[in-house]
Image (cartoon, rainbow, N blue to C red):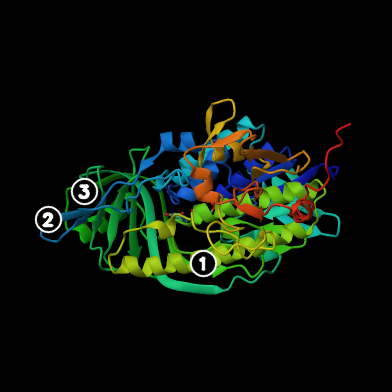
């Protein structure tokens, strides 16, 4: 049996497992990331990167690479039976602001997103172990003993925590006997990545948009020569995903014989469900991503929500491994399960709307307004009645360093640390590992640029805002409330001040 040297086993190297691995790697936490597939997933399925996820990818150091690999969503072109067509924007267009630098969903096929995430992981000194399957586990008070099966045979490993990032059919969820209630939505569809001729790449082509039976659409996949074909299919029977089978469907639904599929790179037939795990944590074992929630692809929420689950639990696992109270890990389910419940409702409503031919998407899918206001980790002292609240996403803002160089709050937040931002604070919070302290004001190290910080945060003189490592407001503290701040810092594992010696 392997010695007790790995802190965390991540089961599954999809978007959720990779996001968690990147976060743990940059924190120096020891982990292994195992993936039962012998090679990376090759499909485009979760292709929309929402604005909130773009902010997170910026923090993880790969947003520019994703933008370079993908592109914006093209307009949708609704083809009519008489051969005419109408074009409209898929996304409501709004301009970015200093507080919200990314406003447009970005299109990157999932296989490219995951490849960029794997490269980032390699830069940080880790890689997924392909062809390695979690086959069993048992937990006790001190850790989890896991069974793995790989090319080298069976292996037993002892870890402190196990994270099931193993997708909708999650072995971990089933082994824990966690309920997965919800409903089957009575819709079955195919998604396929195809090379085709007969359609230009300037639009997302849709035919029979108002029929849930005869709809078919072709989305040019940014960064590739492929189109993603999507179409509902009957609930029962074999789905013919061959070139010939798809060409027959295309002819039948479009009435055109000039659209010809030449090859199929990936194809899948799937039945749509909306299901949510009863629990996200059992002792030392956690569920993230599709293992905890499945839903229709409408609205492009799945990959985004899965990746953000991982982003929520990563810093908490690292903190508890470094001595923070175990209760911090309970806040993972407390914060993320309500988000998934809301997302299930949104994706289901959008599925119903798409059956009526309504495809336009707005701010409701951007995930910028999601937060953790009800969390036990949200502290206001005194309570605030409006504006930015504890638990909200921390806004960006341009600032100047006292030395005169321009910067942004997001640049200061980037990395695994917490950030304490004060306005003209008089008393001191002592320096400690994992906390970056900045002050805006007459003798501060930062200057508010054009009042953007003031407008976004509305801190009173002497006030402080504490930003969590995942970019949410942990606490907003008024002048003279340093004791409340210290108690909060102890709760999240930052309570021990460094010996200044
Ligand atoms: C057909 C289809 C179309 C979709 N379209 C969209 C879309 O348009 N937009 C969107 O946002 N989302 C979409 N989604 C959802 C999106 O792809 C998922 O939400 C996302 O992939 C979830 O990531 P994950 O890492 O949680 O799970 P997954 O991507 O499923 O990854 C789980 C991984 O765990 C591995 N694994 C499982 N069991 C074990 C084990 N015992 N040991 C080791 N490894 C294991 C699996 O092989 C897999 O690689 C779609 C999903 C499907 C199926």
Which circle, 3 or 2, is nearer the viewer?
Answer: 2
Up the image or down, 225 lies above or below 384; here it is: above
Which residue is tagged 1? Answer: 342
Foreground residue, 303 or 159?
Answer: 303
Q: Earlier in the sequence, mark 3 or mark 2?
A: 2
Above or below — where is 447 with respect to 149? above
Q: Nearer the viewer, residue 9 or 36?
A: 9
- In the displayed structure, does residue 123 sit left or right of residue 319? left
Mark 2 or mark 1, earlier in chain: 2
Q: Quadrant of the C terminus?
A: top right
Residues under labels 3 and 2: Cα distance?
Answer: 16 Å
Q: Residue at x 53, y 47 (%)?
A: 454
| Along the line of sight, the residue nearer the viewer: 406 or 90 | 406
What residue lies at 55% left-to-right and 53% top-to-bottom? 393
The answer to whether marks 3 and 2 mark residues whose Cβ atoms lie closer than 8 Å is no
Q: Which mark is residue 439?
A: none
Left or right: 28 as drawn, with respect to 107: right
How far apart marks 2 and 1 lie (CA) works out to 38 Å
Snapshot quadrant of residue 92? bottom left
Crowd rating for badge 1 (residues with CA inside 10 Å; few <14, some 14–19, many 20+): few
Q: Furthest-right residue in view?
A: 501
In percent of width and height, residue 391 lies at 61, 58
Element type at mark 1: helix
Residue 285 in view, yes or no: yes
Secondary structure under tag 3 reads loop
The earlier-in-sequence mark between 3 and 1 is: 3
Label 2 Cα neighbours within 10 Å, binned few <14 / some 14-19 / many ≥20:
few
Q: Residue at x 67, y 37 (%)?
A: 26
Of circles 2 and 1, the one toward us is 1
Label 3 sits on residue: 259
């Amino acid at each position: 049996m392997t010695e007790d040297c790995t802190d965390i086993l991540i089961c599954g190297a999809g978007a959720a497992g990779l996001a968690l691995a990147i976060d743990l790697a940059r924190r120096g936490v020891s982990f292994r990331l195992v993936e039962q597939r012998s090679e990376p997933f090759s499909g485009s399925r979760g292709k929309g990167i929402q604005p909130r996820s773009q902010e997170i990818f910026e923090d993880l150091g790969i947003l520019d690479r994703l933008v370079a690999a993908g592109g914006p969503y093209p307009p949708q072109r609704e083809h009519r039976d008489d051969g005419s067509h109408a074009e409209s924007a898929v996304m409501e267009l709004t301009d970015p602001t200093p507080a919200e630098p990314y406003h447009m969903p970005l299109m990157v096929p999932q296989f490219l997103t995951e490849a960029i995430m794997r490269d980032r992981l390699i830069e940080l000194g880790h890689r997924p172990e392909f062809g390695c399957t979690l086959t069993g586990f048992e937990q006790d008070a001190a850790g989890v003993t896991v069974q793995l099966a790989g090319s080298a045979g069976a292996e037993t490993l002892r870890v402190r925590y196990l994270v099931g990032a193993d997708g909708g059919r999650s072995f971990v969820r089933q082994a824990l006997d966690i309920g997965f209630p919800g409903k089957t939505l009575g819709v079955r569809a195919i998604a396929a990545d195809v090379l085709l001729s007969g359609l230009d790449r300037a639009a997302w082509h849709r035919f029979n948009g108002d029929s849930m039976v005869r709809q078919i659409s072709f989305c040019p996949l940014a960064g590739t020569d492929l189109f993603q074909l999507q179409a509902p299919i009957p609930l029962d029977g074999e789905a013919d995903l061959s070139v010939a089978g798809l060409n027959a469907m295309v002819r039948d639904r479009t009435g055109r014989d000039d659209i010809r599929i030449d090859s199929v790179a990936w194809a899948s037939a799937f039945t749509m469900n909306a299901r949510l795990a009863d629990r996200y944590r059992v002792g030392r074992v956690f569920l993230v991503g599709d293992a905890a929630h499945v839903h229709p692809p409408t609205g492009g929420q799945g990959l985004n929500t899965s990746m953000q689950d991982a982003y929520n639990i990563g810093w908490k696992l690292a903190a508890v491994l470094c001595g923070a109270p175990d209760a911090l890990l309970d806040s993972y389910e407390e914060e993320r399960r309500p988000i998934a419940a809301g997302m299930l409702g949104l994706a289901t409503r959008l599925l119903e709307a798409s059956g009526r031919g309504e495809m336009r998407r707005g701010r409701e899918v951007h995930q910028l307004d999601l937060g953790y206001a009800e969390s036990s980790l949200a502290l206001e002292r005194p309570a605030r009645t409006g504006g930015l609240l504890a638990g909200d996403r921390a806004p960006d803002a341009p600032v100047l360093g006292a030395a005169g160089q321009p910067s942004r709050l997001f640049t200061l937040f980037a990395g695994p640390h917490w950030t304490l931002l004060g306005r003209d604070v008089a008393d001191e919070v002592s320096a400690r590992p994992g906390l970056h302290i900045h002050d805006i004001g007459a003798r501060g190290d930062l200057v508010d640029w054009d009042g953007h910080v003031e407008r976004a945060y509305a801190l009173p003189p002497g006030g402080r805002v504490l930003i969590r490592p995942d970019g949410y407001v942990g606490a907003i503290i008024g002048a003279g409330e340093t004791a409340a701040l210290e108690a909060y810092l102890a709760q999240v594992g930052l309570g021990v001040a460094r010996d200044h010696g």
